[in-house]
Image: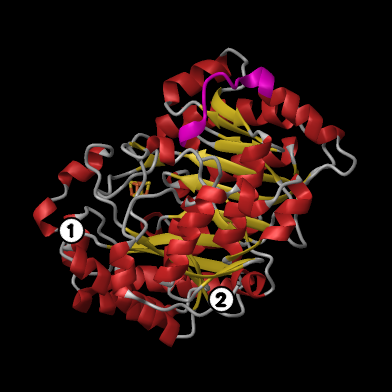
Amino acid sequence: MKQEVLFNPQLIERYDTTGPRYTSYPTAVQFHEGFDAIAYRRFTDASNAELIPRPLSLYVHLPFCQSLCYYCGCTKKITRNPEHGQAYLKQLFTEIEMQGQLFDPDRAVLQLHLGGGTPTFFDDSQLEALMAELGRRFSLLKTGAREYAIEIDPRTVDAGRLRHLQSLGFNRISMGVQDFDPKVQKAVNRIQDEQETLELIAGAQEMGFESVSVDLIYGLPLQTPNTFRKTIETVISARPSRLAIYNYAHLPQMFRAQRMINANHIPKPATKLALLELTIGLLIEAGYVYIGMDHFALPDDELAIAQKEDRLQRNFQGYSTFSECDLVGLGMSSIGKIGDCYAQNYKEIPAWQSAVDAGDLPIWRGLVLNTEDRLRRMIIESIMCRGELKFAEYECCFGLEFTEHFAPEMEVLKRQAEDGLLELDDDGFTVTPAGRLLLRNVAMVFDEYLARAADNRPFSHVI
Ligand code: SF4
């Protein structure tokens, strides 16, 4: 994919709509309760029986946080009571044991991601016990090409804890910063010391973590281009290898926490656009490469290299360099992907706990992909990761004539080409530097479920 990106405010305004982030296709909205634990076991059995079974990727959801950030849209539980965490771990270990029995022990775990909530809500000994349990039930790797990542909250971690995480096998960390401005921090109820955060980033770099990723959010209450510039410049000075810059989506009807935010303090659309333009400009000027969606990386980071070499992939954690894994979701609300199925655990802790206590896999819902889903998934992944499509690749794999099969979609693509989002010819198309900020809009053309839900899309704005 071309690594250039061009900020075109008119185009962005014209294409400003809501849409999925395509960490999966079909998206979780299509999952249904007809898919159960029995169906899931069919897929795990089949995945073991393949000639060369795929390696594994594990996602563990740890939902607890000590305080509520008002912008939060994550699946989390706010508590200061450590007993809640201990009870959760007990059941999580049971689920890990059940899931571990489903996979051949020689299937190595190439990727591991602890997400939340706040995984570092748990103390060192609890995280150590968790890693030991995962190591007992799955083939964790100690060395070699592997991505073992944990989301940390800088307010709960110091250098000593970082060293301990490294000794447990983690080689990547990501941390939320969002904004260093004290007024913004107060407005979103996330007070996080700038100096401590910078020291933590520097500490992780010195210790040799392969990747240090920082999350920022634009569009938060009381943000202005001037204040946000300071935050970005400060973060850039710390040189994290990856940066994710998310758009704040104010959806108080969906996320109760956001009702605590004064809607009058949220930047107007024109200011949000200015914040985005500023962010992109500063990061590109500082040498960061635009990966896609909200992600930037330093040129020597694996994501940027994979993008340059057309090896970028997309999964539930966003962009990735590992494609061939089956994903096992562990913990409440987590989503797995085994072969051509998706499976999601119960989203509420009590339902998840009851299933585990009864000795059942806590699968709530899922989906088996049909041929059309697989075709469209490949297309959407190509757009999101490579920003291009070669029609012939799908014609031979799926036995179809591309422009005939996708006649209505071709009409939309022609309009997008006229608008400057892509360059279209008889063989395929390439997204332009101006269209790269609107990758989701191009991908949405091939989402056959989206048209049916046009009046009620539970998705965030594309910009
Ligand atoms: S943003 Fe992160 S730390 Fe804050 S409440 Fe949500 S999950 Fe917890």
Q: CA distance from mark 1 to mark 2?
A: 31 Å
Residue at image point 31% right, 47% down? 72
Please tell me in which quadrant of the rendered image residue 361 appears: top right
Q: Please, which residue is most extreme toward the top here?
A: 358
Residue annotated with mark 2:
206
Quadrant (top left, top right, bottom left, bottom right) of the C terminus: bottom left
x then y, percent, for residue 343:
59, 31
Q: What secondary structure is marked by label 1? A: helix
Kindly indicate whether the residue at mark 2 contacts the one at mark 1 (C-beta within 8 angstroms).
no
Kind of residue at badge 1: Lys
Visible in this render: residue 170?
no
The residue labelled by disc 1 is 186
The residue shown at (43%, 72%) is 420
Return the residue nearer the eye: 216 or 142: 216
* Residue 289: % across, % down: 51, 77
In this picture, residue 250 sits left or right of residue 233: left
- Res 408 label: none
Q: What span is in magenta?
A: 29-39
Q: Which of the pair 441/268 is nearer the observer? A: 441
Q: Which sits earlier in the primary sequence, circle 1 or circle 2?
A: 1
Based on the picture, tell me whether residue 33 belongs to the magenta stretch.
yes
Tell me if residue 462 comes above or below residue 351 in the rendering. below
Mark 2 residue crowding within 10 angstroms, few (<14) / some (14–19) / many (20+): few
SS at mark 2 in the image: helix
Neighbourhood count class around disc 1 (C-alpha, 10 Å): few under 14, some 14–19, many 20 upward? some
Q: Is residue 269 left or right of residue 237?
A: left
Q: Residue 318, image x and y in percent?
A: 53, 55
What amino acid is at disc 2?
A: Glu
Which tag is nearer the camera, tag 1 or tag 2? 1
Q: Residue placed at 58% from the left, 80% from the top?
A: 299
